[in-house]
Image: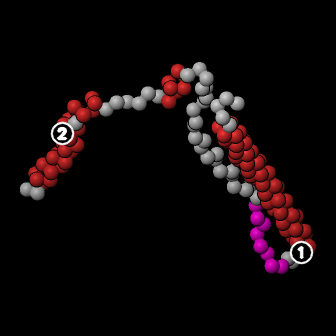
Amino acid sequence: MKQAPMKTLIATLLLVPVLGFSQIGDNASRIKKKPPATAAASQDPDVNFTPYTPLEMEAAPALPTCVQPPIVKAFSVKEKADKFNAALNDYQACVKNYAEVHGKAANQHAEASNKAVADANAYFNELSNKSDKPAGE
């Protein structure tokens, strides 16, 4: 017996949004749609620009593939100690290379970002200086 009222309740809840949208049909015809931003720009030949498109974050760099040698407190044979030292030097070189490569990339991103801000500041300063002058000049 409990299933019949539950089915009725579910059916009623599913119909509420449909009935609600059917009642606002008259208002939907009165809503004015804005023209696309590019249409306004194309009407004025003096204003020509490319609309802003947000950038997406670039993929995170791959994690380092450097292999850490297992930690050993003491070596019974000199050859094992030499192999450990070679592996340790290899690991250190790998981490150093990873840090250098990704550090350079980070610096390039920071420089590009700073240049974009500097260019924008210069543009707005020039725009501000032109708007301060009287119209006849």
Give the residue displayed 76% in from the left and 65% down from the top: 68
Residue 109 seen anywhere in this rendered image of the structure: no
Above or below 71: residue 20:
above
- Total labels: the figure holds 2
Task: Name the residue carrying label 2.
Answer: 19
Give the residue displayed 11% in from the left and 57% down from the top: 2
Give the residue displayed 20% in from the left and 35% down from the top: 22
Percent from the top left, x then y, of residue 43?
Answer: 52, 21
Label 1, residues with CA under 10 Å away: few <14, some 14-19, many ≥20? few
Above or below 28: residue 80:
below
Quadrant of res 124: top right
Q: Secondary structure at mark 1?
A: loop
Q: Secondary structure at mark 2?
A: helix
Q: Amino acid at mark 2?
A: Leu
**Is residue 12 a member of the stretch shown in magenta?**
no
Question: Marks 1 and 2, Cα distance to the nearest angstrom?
Answer: 84 Å
Instruction: State the quadrant of the C terminus.
Output: top right
Report the magenta residues as a range: 67-74
Q: Nearer the viewer, residue 73 or 12?
A: 12
Q: Nearer the viewer, residue 68 or 17?
A: 17
Q: Nearer the viewer, residue 136 or 105?
A: 136
85 left or right of 127 in image = right
**Is residue 69 a member of the stretch shown in magenta?**
yes
Percent from the top left, x then y, of residue 101?
Answer: 79, 51
- What type of secondary structure mainly makes up the magenta span? loop
Task: Name the residue carrying label 1.
Answer: 77
Residue 108, disc: none
Above or below 72: residue 106:
above
36 left or right of 116 in image = left
Going from the N terminus, do you reach mark 1 or mark 2 first?
2
Q: Tell me which colouring the rendered structure shows.
A: secondary structure
Instruction: State the quadrant of the N terminus.
Output: bottom left
